[in-house]
Image (cartoon, rainbow, N blue to C red):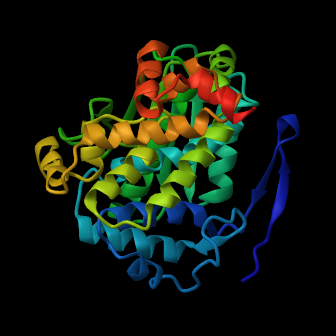
Amino acid sequence: MVNDETKVDLPYDSELIIYDKMKILALHLHHVIEYASMRGISRQELISLLAKPPANFLDETETISKEDFYAVIDTIANQLKEEELGIRLGNFLNLGALGLIYQISLQATTTEEALYYLQMYLNATLPFVNIQTSIDADWVSIILNIDNKQLEANRIILENILTVIAREVALMTTKEVSIIKTSPFFTKNYPDDWKASTHYSVNFTPTILKATLQDKSRLHLDVLIPEYLKLIEGLKTETGFANKVRIASLHLAKPELPDLASVADAFHLTSRTFQRRLLAENTTFRQITDDLRKQISNLLIRHNRFSITDISYVLGYSEPAAFIHSFKKWFGEAPDRMRQKAFS
């Protein structure tokens, strides 16, 4: 079936392709398969479920059928059997979402605008998901639902999307903004920012985005995201658990690297079991994080758009002095000196 593509004019000269309403952007499934592969499910097995696999999952014009999408979700759900699978998927997909966040951040200056872009994106790339938004003086609500009755798969899909949206909101606003997610399947094992409800939703206090976005723009996510993705691709040749931890850490970056508990949860492991598995491969989470910080700093120091303060923030240091100390330990010289050599 040939895609029926039209274009919708968006404000500020932005464009978004609208696909056939029965088709889903293949990139969404790519991220799901990446996570399943990290959890030990065969990539080939999942792709074999597709009636017509896309030639390139990363091509933003490639689509798949809803039936193929659900076949993969159902298979992963049956193999992993985890209540919080959608939430873990949403956390893992955060890196992919950052690309969209950056594009929104260049344009949106109010909550209303950001929600408009979000709704257009979901309508275009996940057309079977229904979205309703409401804004008043005290609260913003984004409510999602799916009309069909595939309850377990829908739970995974919707909780995944809610997790990604909440992360987008957190990045686009201030830390003081309260964000609550709700689900009809809520249990006491859910993270603290989830509550029980009859519907799936993200709710947060309204805020003006412009000042925050201008501050976030210094992170230059258009540079940072491709660098992270290149690191991920370079790591995929190794198969050990420690290497999967490196890949997961980059996926969970926001943009600073995640802590041990967050990465352990991505594998549905306790922190103690997680650390034991790393020790069995003669490494620790601290060593892995330190190595990733070294690699990322070596990449970002070659981009003049990042100040030393920016890089220290991205790497999760509390202050630039701590980053400079680590940099000297890694490379034997100060970051400013190394940057001068790179551009001389």
Please give left or right for residue 133 compared with residue 241 in the image: right
* Res 111 visible: no
**Residue at 50 percent of width and 34 percent of height:** 255
**Location of residue 272 by image quarter:** top left
Q: Quadrant of the N terminus?
A: bottom right
**Residue at 26 percent of width and 71 percent of height:** 78
**Residue at 62 percent of width and 48 percent of height:** 226
Please give left or right for residue 64 compared with residue 184 in the image: right
- State the count of labels: 0
* Res 72 visible: yes
In the image, residue 122 sits, relative to residue 14, either above or below, namely below
Residue 307, image x, y percentages: 63, 21
Is 331 in front, or is 124?
Answer: 331
Residue 42, image x, y percentages: 35, 76
Is 257 in front, or is 42?
Answer: 257
Please give left or right for residue 212 compared with residue 175 in the image: right
In the image, residue 143 sits, relative to residue 215, either above or below, namely below
Residue 110, image x, y percentages: 69, 22
**Residue at 23 percent of width and 57 percent of height:** 82
Q: Quadrant of the C terminus?
A: top right
Residue 277, image x, y percentages: 16, 54
